[in-house]
Amino acid sequence: MKRRGFVTLPALALASSQLPAPAARASAAADAAGFAAAGFESPSVVEGNMPVFAEQLKAELDFPLAWASRRGRNFGAWKRQARAKVEELLWQPVDRSPFDVEIVDEKARDGYRQRQVLFNVTRHSRVRATMLVPDGPGPFPAALLLHDHGAKFDIGKEKLIEPWYDDTRLVSARAWSEKYFSGRFVGNELASRGYAVLAVDALGWGDRGGLAYDGQQALAANFFNLGSSLAGLLAREDVRAAAMLATLPEIDERRIAAVGFSMGAYRAWQVAALSDDIAATVAACWMTGLKEMMVPGNNTLRGQSAFYMLHPGLYRYLDIPDVASLAAPRPMMLLDGATDPLFTPAGVAVAYAKMRAVWESQHAGHRLRTTIWPELGHVFVREMQDDAFAWLDRRLRR
């Protein structure tokens, strides 16, 4: 009897891996065609960290809890239902631990005081935050400042409030400020305008460091194994920080803004969606439609930092701008750069249109400001800041 020859799948994979890149891609495509002809999918065809059926998965996402799908229903009831779903998928229980705020350092600066405060951001974590409080009797309008990611973990809160307590962090923070903020510290600029500001390190940054870029995915996986969520913790801590800020005697609890850049912008509109303590939001350079973000080459497809913004299962119910729209009809300003490599123009346009429809449905279109800055990329430079702070003044300054 004639012996049949065969090649194992591992052998095929090994052979392809030894080919030059173009040849390897051609080989993979040929393999895929062969498997398809045989009636089953190749287990080895993954392009850009995406499965070969990614487009089919995207097509199945119809965001049934979006306001666009619930038009004609009570807006308040929609917000309660949609927020409840987001809260469920945070995998972080509501935390009502006492904040137990303690001022551990205070120094005078021109026009305001610099403070370091300790407080319980959750039942598990007592953190050091920085504050700037204007001189005078108050109560003052305030801003919760949400720092970015940037794969730079040695500083967190120091990216937004100039550190007076650590020379090493000061050098690092000034370099970051030059790179993204025209040499300004956003918090110090707001304090000079009469706002009290608060900044807190997210888990992994600054005082809460010890994280490297390639450790993020493992950290997130370990949270999942513990029945919890890294992204959910980030969201819960930001809600708690807003709530703590509202309790301070110097603060007008009705005039608290959330302000952030990059991942901080994501955090800003997210906390506005989940917290009634936020009266207005400024979010620079983080808004897109989910489907338009999940395209070849996008940074999100690498994993790692994406886990700080990944709530498992959420997008089966709501698109990214749908979540941000839970803040409606409160004032919100979104700024994006036309040349930002992290977000496609199509994704930004889709998101802006969805959000515009929500605010206008509540006769509050004038409270939503969306701006795409031509010739600017992933930055929050002086001219963007000046525009944003003037807008914020009109909403929160008396």
Image (tube, grey):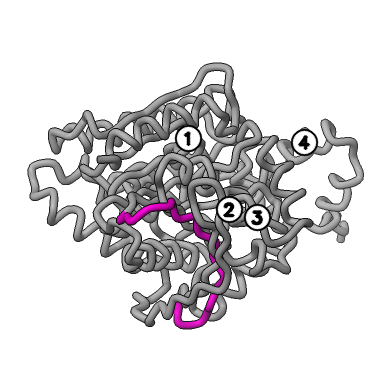
Q: Earlier in the sequence, mark 3 or mark 1?
A: 3
Task: Identify the residue at image location x=33%, y=36%.
Answer: 393
Dot 3 and dot 1 residues touching (CB under 8 Å): no
* Marks 3/1: CA–CA distance: 38 Å
Residue type (three-letter) at the residue carrying disc 3: Pro
Most foreground residue, 334 or 107 = 107
Q: Residues within 10 Å of mark 4 (few under 14, many from 20)?
A: some
Label 4: which secondary element: helix
Q: Residues within 10 Å of mark 2 (few under 14, many from 20)?
A: some
Residue type (three-letter) at the residue carrying disc 2: Ala
On-image quarter of the C terminus: top left
Magenta stretch bounds = 122-139
Write down the residue under mark 4: 25
Q: Please identify the quarter of the rendering in which residue 26 is found.
A: top right
Q: Earlier in the sequence, mark 4 or mark 2?
A: 4
Q: Is residue 126 magenta?
A: yes
Give the number of the disc on residue 292: 1
Give the number of the disc on residue 163: 3
For the image, the number of numbered tags is: 4
Q: Nearer the viewer, mark 2 or mark 3?
A: 3
Residue type (three-letter) at the residue carrying disc 1: Glu
* Marks 2/1: CA–CA distance: 15 Å
On-image quarter of the N terminus: bottom right
Give the number of the disc on residue 145: none
Task: Identify the residue at image location x=66%, y=47%.
Answer: 150
* Marks 4/3: CA–CA distance: 50 Å
* Marks 4/2: CA–CA distance: 27 Å
Give percent across and percent down for residue 219.
64, 69
Label 3: which secondary element: loop
Q: Residues within 10 Å of mark 1 (few under 14, many from 20)?
A: some
Dot 2 and dot 3 residues touching (CB under 8 Å): no
